[in-house]
Structures are given as structure tokens and as C-alpha cells.
């Protein structure tokens, strides 16, 4: 069956929206400081490999490229995140176009994306979710073109994008699984009856192969990490799934994406797009069943937002137009204010506690220099003659990354957390005192070292209630056995 052609793309206004997003993110990228994950990526960038314990290689590689070109600062590191967010705005507008959205609908889709809290939050800092979001949007665009045109060659584009996306984050298999289930339920099954389908799978597998081989040869540590997340946080993730789906995108966009779902499901001219609509609830079921985090399903809401912009504009042109436009304008302003306040560093650092219940990641960008300075004061308590045999050890990769970045007067920091455990451990001749940085004291963990004294507590100076506020810096007598023998016991996956 011949599908309708798509409207012309609103290139100039959509580009202007994307540029505006990039300008705002750039202006704010230097406030607060590094996020704990960014501190980890900085170090991972110096240990480039085909895989890491908790992630594929693409994000550390992009971090390295960004720092090499733009500088080893929060602003320099975050250029790639800013560019990714701007491209996401453009791709969502293209999705609106693919769904027969006219010029104004495309512009509105770009604007809604630009104001969405999740987009701004992931665009502000470097994370695997930053590039995962862009990949999901490109995959959604190619999937819609496949469904609209029934041209199997789009499977090759989907395979190419999926392969690259798997080199960044494995979650990309979830929306694809949801889409395939939806196609099997609603059709058209004909898109699966072409050699392009297995060819696309082969392309994806070929590109993803280096990392998958790395995982296989290292006993699939990513599965251990994922299992730990589900075991530790699964119940809370399920309870908070719906509230966070609403809050993290924006409560004011709920009517838009509901309208988008109904449009895709009910409109005869868009019947071909039904699998995309159904894939969102299918994905939600998958995430809830596995105890995954709420944001695992969040990107597909942007596809529904893109679908909902045309009916939103139609609603604005019906009935009491001045009243409806006033309501819409108020919602847009409130969306901008709340999204910025909860996801961007617009508040003083001392006021960050106000947004932590919704977005704890804001607090994870405060206090790292103070943590390193506290560790330095404890390190200086070690007699000078013993420092050559002493070790600085951190309980998690954020702390170790902070000690690596703000290391004036400090030796290299070690940790058993995630991929830090795969990098060079201390040599066995480092049998002297150990400065141990840890969020909470643990007799079981401290038993790996000699007598430990609580030498200092971390204070970020802003009273921000993040995970490292009040962390302990212990001075321990030394390891209980050689580091080479102790190291396997210090490995932590979550």
C-alpha cells in the first residue's frame, strides 16, 4: 500500500530552537561541578577499552574527544552532551514530520523537547543516558520510516544505529524488543518477511561485536551490575515508576503525549504507526517486570509528544481560542521554569536540597573538591617517611574520580568499584597506611585493613544532602594481606 508523503521540514525554526538549547546548556555547563559519573568517565577515558564492567566504550571515548578538543573542565567535557541534546531536538521534530505534522507541529515538537526536563538534564552533563536518548530518537525515526514506507532497506539503517547505540548502552534493546512485540500484535508483519530484517540484525551484531566479545571474555560483568541494581532498587523503582515518568519529562507535557498516543491509535491515516504507540506500554511492562529505573522507558514518551503536537495545535484553534492559548502559554512557562529548576544548575548550590527529591543528580555535582581536600588533610597525617608505602583508597568510583581530578599533593587513588577494579591495583610493596574514603563505615569492609581511625568527615560547605556529605575519611594501619591477594575481595559491582 502506498503511504502518504510527509510535509516539508521546518528547517530554520527547528534549528533555531536547537541552537537556543545549546546556548542555554553551554551558558550553564560550568556551574556547580563534575557529576560523579563524569569524574569516572574522565579516568575511564585514560583506560580506553572495548568494554568496562558497567558500560560499553562509547561514552568514555566521547568524553576523551570532548576534553581533548575543548579542555579538561566541566564545560569542555560537556560540549558533546550539549550537541547531543541539540540533535535530539531536531530528530524529535523530524519524528513529528514523519507523523504528518505540519510546520507548526514540528516547531512545537522541537519546543516541547527543548523544555522537557529529561532532555535538559541529560544534555547538561555527560552520561550514557545522554547519548542513549539521541540513539532512541534516531531509531524511532527510522522505525517510523520503515512502517510508513514499508521499505525494508530501513532495517539496515536501524541495524547500523542499533549497533552504535549498543556500544554506548545496552538498554537500546528494550525499545526494539517492545517494537517487535507490538508489530507481532498489531502488524504489519510483512516488514519482518524480508531479507533486510536479518541483514539489519547482522549489521547491528557486527558493530556491537567488539564489546559483546569483551563482556563474554570477562564473564558478563554487566549482568552482575544490572542484577545488583534490580535487587537493591527494584521495589522502589516500581513504586516510583509512574510518578517519575510524569515528573522527569514534565507534568505539563502529559496532555500532549496522551493526545499523541490516542492520535496514533485512533487516526485511520496513521494506522500504520500503531506499533509505535503500543511499544510504549509494552516497554513499561518490561521495565516494571525487571525492576528497571523509570527513565528506561522515558524516551518513548518523546515520540508520543511528537505525535501529540498536531492535535494540540488543533485544540488551540477550536472553541474559546484566547482562553486556550492563555492556558497553553501558562503551561509552557511553567514547564520551562520547573524543568530548568529541577534539571539545570540555575539555583544557588546552597538551595539544591529543594530539588533533590525529584532529581538527586543535581546534588551529585557539588562537593568533590572539598572531598579531595579532606582526604589531603588526612594523608598529611601520615609520617613523611611512610608515605611511599601508603595507599589512597576510595569506596566508589565518584570518590576515586574526585581524588584523581583534584589530586594536588595526593598520590594516585585506587578503588575496587566497577572498572576501577580492573585498572592497576597497588603493588604489594605498598604495605603502609591506608587512607580510606567511604560513605558509611562498614566493619566488614574495614576488616580488609588494619585498625581504622575516623580521621575526618567530608563537608561540602553548602549543606547539600548528597551521598558524600558526611562521608568518612579513615586512617588505617595497612592492608591485612598483600594487595594482589586482597584485590578480589575489594571488587564491588554496585
Image: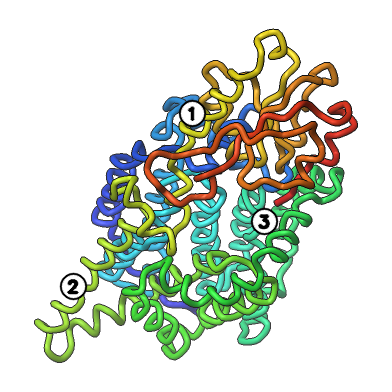
Residue 199: percent from left, percent from top: 73, 59
Picture layout, residue 256 above or below residue 51: below
For numbered disc 2, what is the local secondary structure?
helix
Q: Residue at x 37, y 74 (%)?
A: 100
**For this rendering, which residue is in front, 193 or 54?**
54
Q: Name the residue carrying label 2.
A: 330
Residue 192: percent from left, percent from top: 69, 74
Q: Is residue 1 visible?
A: no
Mark 2 or mark 3, which has the lower sequence index?
Answer: 3
**For this rendering, which residue is in front, 70 or 384?**
384
The answer to which quarter of the image holds residue 455 is: top right
For numbered disc 1, what is the local secondary structure?
helix
The answer to which quarter of the image holds residue 79 is: top left
Disc 1 to disc 2, C-alpha distance: 39 Å
Q: Residue furthest left?
A: 322
Label 1: few (<14), some (14–19) or many (≥20) C-alpha neighbours in 10 Å: many
Amino acid at each position: 500500500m502506498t503511504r502518504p508523503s510527509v510535509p516539508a521540514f521546518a528547517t530554520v525554526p527547528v534549528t533555531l530552537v536547537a541552537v537556543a538549547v545549546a546556548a542555554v546548556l553551554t551558558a550553564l555547563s560550568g556551574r556547580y561541578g563534575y557529576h560523579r559519573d563524569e569524574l569516572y568517565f574522565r579516568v575511564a577515558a585514560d583506560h580506553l577499552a572495548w568494554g568496562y564492567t558497567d558500560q560499553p566504550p562509547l561514552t568514555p571515548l566521547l568524553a576523551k574527544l570532548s576534553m581533548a578538543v575543548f579542555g579538561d573542565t566541566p564545560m569542555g567535557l560537556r560540549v558533546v552532551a550539549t550537541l547531543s541534546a541539540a540533535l535530539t531536538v531536531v530528530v524529535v521534530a523530524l519524528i513529528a514530520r514523519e507523523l504528518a505534522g505540519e510546520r507548526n507541529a514540528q516547531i512545537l515538537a522541537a519546543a516541547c523537547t527543548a523544555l522537557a526536563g529529561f532532555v535538559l538534564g541529560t544534555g547538561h552533563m555527560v552520561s550514557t543516558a545522554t547519548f542513549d536518548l539521541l540513539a532512541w530518537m534516531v531509531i524511532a525515526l527510522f522505525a517510523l520510516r520503515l512502517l510508513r514506507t514499508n521499505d525494508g532497506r530501513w532495517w539496515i539503517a536501524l541495524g547500523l544505529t542499533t549497533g552504535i547505540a549498543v556500544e554506548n548502552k545496552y538498554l537500546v534493546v528494550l525499545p526494539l524488543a517492545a517494537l517487535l512485540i507490538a508489530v507481532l500484535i498489531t502488524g504489519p508483519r510483512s516488514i519482518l518477511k524480508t531479507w533486510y530484517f536479518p541483514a539489519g540484525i547482522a549489521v547491528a551484531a557486527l558493530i556491537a561485536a567488539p564489546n559483546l566479545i569483551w563482556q563474554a571474555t570477562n564473564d558478563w560483568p554487566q549482568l552482575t551490575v544490572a542484577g545488583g541494581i534490580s535487587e537493591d532498587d527494584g521495589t522502589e523503582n516500581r513504586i516510583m515508576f509512574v510518578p517519575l515518568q510524569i515528573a522527569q519529562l514534565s507534568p505539563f507535557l502529559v496532555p500532549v503525549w496522551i493526545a499523541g498516543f490516542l492520535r496514533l491509535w485512533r487516526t485511520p491515516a496513521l494506522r500504520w504507526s500503531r506499533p509505535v504507540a503500543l511499544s510504549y506500554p509494552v516497554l513499561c511492562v518490561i521495565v516494571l517486570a525487571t525492576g528497571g529505573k523509570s527513565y528506561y522507558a522515558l524516551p518513548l514518551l518523546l515520540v508520543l509528544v511528537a505525535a501529540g503536537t498536531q492535535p494540540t495545535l488543533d485544540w488551540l484553534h477550536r472553541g474559546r481560542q484566547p482562553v486556550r492559548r492563555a492556558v497553553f502559554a501558562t503551561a509552557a512557562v511553567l514547564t520551562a521554569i520547573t524543568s530548568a529548576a529541577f534539571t539545570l544548575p540555575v539555583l544557588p548550590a546552597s538551595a539544591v536540597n529543594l530539588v533533590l527529591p525529584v532529581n538527586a543528580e543535581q546534588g551529585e555535582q557539588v562537593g568533590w573538591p572539598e572531598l579531595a581536600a579532606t582526604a589531603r588533610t588526612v594523608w598529611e597525617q601520615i609520617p613523611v617517611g611512610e608515605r611511599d608505602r601508603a595507599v589512597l583508597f576510595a569506596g566508589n568510583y565518584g570518590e576515586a574520580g574526585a581524588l584523581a581530578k583534584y589530586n594536588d599533593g595526593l598520590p594516585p587513588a585506587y578503588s575496587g568499584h566497577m572498572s576501577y577494579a580492573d585498572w592497576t591495583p597497588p603493588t604489594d610493596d605498598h604495605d603502609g597506611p591506608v587512607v580510606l574514603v567511604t560513605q558509611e563505615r562498614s566493619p566488614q569492609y574495614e576488616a580488609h585493613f588494619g585498625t581504622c581511625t575516623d580521621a575526618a568527615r567530608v563537608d561540602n560547605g553548602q549543606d547539600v544532602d548528597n551521598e558524600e556529605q558526611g562521608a568518612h575519611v579513615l586512617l588505617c594501619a595497612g592492608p591485612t594481606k598483600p594487595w594482589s591477594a586482597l584485590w578480589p575481595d575489594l571488587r564491588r559491582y554496585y
